[in-house]
Amino acid sequence: MHTNRRNFLKLSATAAVATAFGGLGLGCTASKSQMADRVAAMSPEWSKQTTTICCYCAVGCGLVVNTSLKDMKAVNVEGDPDHPVNEGSLCAKGASIWQLANNDRRPDSVMYRAPYSKKFKKVSMAWALERIAHNVKKTRDETFTRINARGETVNRCDGIASVGSAALDNEECWAYQTMLRSLGLVYIEHQARI
Amino acid sequence: MTNHWIDIKNSDCILIMGSNAAENHPISFKWVTKAQEKGATVIHVDPRFTRTSAKADMYAGIRSGSDIAVLGGMIKYILDNELIFKDYVVDYTNASFIIGDNYKFDDGIFAGYDPETKSYDKSKWAFAMDSKGNPKKDPTLQDPKCVYQMLKKHYERYDLDKVSDISGMSKDEVIGLYEAYCATGKKDKAGTIMYAMGWTQHTVGVQNIRSMAMIQLLLGNIGIAGGGVNALRGESNVQGSTDHCLLFHILPGYLKTPKASQQTLAEYDKAYTPVSNDPKSANWWSNYPKYSASLIKSMWQDDDPKVAYNYLPRLDSGNAADYAWLALFDKMDAGQFKGFFAWGMNPACSGANSNKTRQAMTKLDWMVNVNIFPNETMQFWEGPGMDPEKIKTEVFFLPCAVSIEKEGSVTNSGRWMQWRYKGPDAPHGLKPDGDIMYEMMHEIQKLYKEEGGVYPDPITKLSWDSIATNGVFDAHKTAKLINGQFTRDIEVKGKKFKKGDQVPSFAYLQADGSTTSGNWLYCNSYTAKGNLAARRSLAQTEEQAKIGLFPNFSWCWPVNRRILYNRASVDLQGKPWNPEKAVIEWTGPKTKWVGDVPDGGWAPGSKYAFIMRKHGFGQLFGPGRADGPLPEYYEPLECPVKSHPFSSTLHNPTAISFADEAKAVCDPKFPLVGTTYRVTEHWQTGVMTRNQEWLTEMEPQVFVEMSEELAELRGFKNGEKVIVTSLRGDLWAKAIVTKRLKPFIVQGTTVHLVGLPWHFGWTWPINEKGESTGGDSANILTPSVGDPNTGIPETKAFMVNVRKA
């Protein structure tokens, strides 16, 4: 990426102050030292800048993300002043993306609910993927239709359905449709349908 | 969008109908405002006065679901007052085509209707053909059977009295709208439409949009700067996910999902490759076999596409009623599916009739849910009214990385494919969706290779490693494959290519397996010149800068064409209708076209303008839709009236619905029109936004907005907790009593409308006692009925009641 650096730094310094206040929620005031830390952390010496596109509506606003080189966490996310569509501005959702990433509500592991169980338990990704693969194979093998009622070859799996997702990147969407269709799924739907 | 966000600034009249752009696409308003500052008129037609209305020059309230009355009336107004852009209509639309003798329209029903199947025999709507097999035409537009005259006849019923009577708009408002918008039917004027789910989520959703597309054709507004038909899409990559066709009926690049009757690739290609006998019709879809073979070759690279065609599953029909969203959950409820993926989606809240959807999930053996946060889908088994001890469903919840933590591209509403870079690391070692699906399929592939299974070839032979590097999902490698590569050394169009070279554009794709292309529409995005989606240059020529084209920033499908159908922006000599805002211009046989990438490089006048249509013309008369070749007025399947003034056919006779689910039509138990919408601070079912304190501080819970008149009538107070009910279920909401909603006078009777945002769900936010403080999804109220073409549920107009909590 090549952002216009002078404009970018000028803008990001202002935005950092706003973000510092915003992040504290109601009833809190920012101490001067906290603000100073936040601004300092955005210095190119301590952070990297990357561009991205907002994950909400399809206006496709540009964002600049500052990531701390120390812990690889986002320090700040703000509108990209060099993006011709949004020219640096963002709506309330786009301006909150920092909190989408830095969020205590994000689960720290895969969760599994056994049949008839009243709770989730934490499991490893490897365990889950292996079990999902077994489930997919079992269901596919049991419900696969080679020939339909009219005697035509159809080669499809009528026992598994999928929904999602417009929240995936293009490359993921393509990979996902490839995966589903190679399994023989035809019940494939997503947000565009609703 | 046929056009793009910045292009809105070029408009002289912006109609916002079926959308609340200022609140739901806030940054779009930067460009609406720029147009307005230069003198453009902004009109908002909506059931509710919103921040879009507040910025508009003109606002008119409309009863939700009555749009075709207003738009049909506008077509009549254009024709009666001869406001069409005559040269454009004659040269570029099918106004001159002669309709065949089998076509009829009688009392709301078109020729060919079968009440048993609730469907039409569309062959009855065919054009009359000449001896060469091309449509007969009358360029004078005088033949009583030509499309232009048939339009006049069809819409003569749509007079001002009827339009006003059924829509609740006053006659003055209707006339004001028509006068302002139809003034754009001139060479140097552009009108545009910004619509969203307010138009699609109806049982006449497709015909809502077709009505407007017809208006745009009549006024010469398609293909020009500041014009077009512009869907404001609501997810960062819903354009891309549609292009890559995560939908039952289409494969990447809008190719068709094979049907059971198409047993070979040749039969399949033949069915979808249109033939035109007119040398002036570019008939672009005649290239279909190149795109289908290249797609199949990208998925199964070691097989001949003719063989690998058998690996693609085939449908029994192409009907939305059999496979689309509503059918999927109906069949799930009937126990058809054992397994279910909800990947990056929260269907427990997002589709119509949430209670039915949630109940359907109890019938599954297993479910995989991938999402950023816990949500109502993965927790459905412990939701309201559920008994976990009776629910067998095994649930896997796989948390994933967020957008700023991964690399890849998304395509915005203006078709710009934009590259995103990875910023921070995801916490707890969470992975991007791409990594998860790569590993999952790798695991499945391994099982089939080791153990065999039913028809294992599509899985074992899948070229799955072509999207990964050293066992890790690789977005660049995938993007290159989506663009396409040559599979052997070959010469095409006088250019030599080596095996493995990137295909420069879809004009070079082949039908014999010598090229891969995961999606022909994206061929040209990642070429020998590199990853064009990542471009950030603001450079443009003087002509391009006049309309803000920015051709060197990101990349746009197809072949970086920023305004679709742009051959219609010039006359038959290639001169722009409006030289001040030229999109393209023919500068002579040597220098050819300047400006945007033209819709085909042929000399002006040598090919018809609408190259994706078989006959090359914009379709005023559209004989391909499930519910008729011309938009016709019908009431929503739940409505407050027993009749409407246009025919005695109350509802769309082809709409999708389930016979065993009752509908409220003039039902005194549900006297209020209900509708759903969004707020700026939340998004979709709220999974991503409800978990952010900054946003829930601003919009903490579900509300029901109502007029002061209704509140007075029923004794509701602002801020009071009330219960909203429909035939499907009920939920609590905070009453917001407001001037933003007004009662409508419909057929002489007062009709009240209430509206709710659908961003909430019972799992979060909660209080210290673990009780939901946000409320539940408004989709608990919405019916399982949908558009016959798309299957999109009618979640914008349904009947409810409101009572005290």
Image (tube, coloured by chain):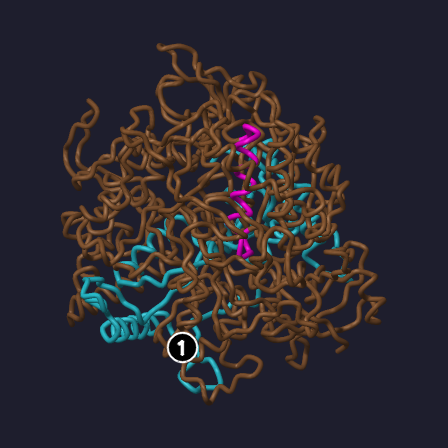
Chain colours: A cyan, B brown
Question: Would you say residue B271 is visible in this rendering?
Answer: yes
Residue that sits furthest to the bottom in the current view: B389
Residue type (three-letter) at the residue carrying disc 1: Ala
Residue situated in front as seen by the camera: B96 or B402 = B96
Q: Position of residue B101 (x, y in %)?
A: 39, 40
Determine the image quadrant of residue A137: bottom left
Q: Position of residue B28 (x, y in %)?
A: 62, 40
Chain of the residue under label 1:
B
Judging by the rendered image, the residue that carries numbered circle 1 is: B334
Magenta stretch encompasses residue B61: no
- Above/below status of A135 relative to B226: below
Q: Quadrant of the C terminus of chain B?
A: bottom right
Q: Along the horizontal axis of the image, is A153 left or right of A73?
A: left
Q: Main secondary structure of the magenta part?
A: helix
| Number of other residues with Cα within 10 Å of mark 1, as a class: few under 14, some 14 to 19, many 20 or more | few
- Above/below status of B94 relative to B408: above
- Element assignment for label 1: loop
Q: Along the horizontal axis of the image, is B187 left or right of B768?
A: left
Determine the image quadrant of residue B70: top right
What segment carries the magenta color?
A: B200-221
Question: Would you say residue B773 is visible in this rendering?
Answer: no
- Above/below status of B682 relative to B138: below
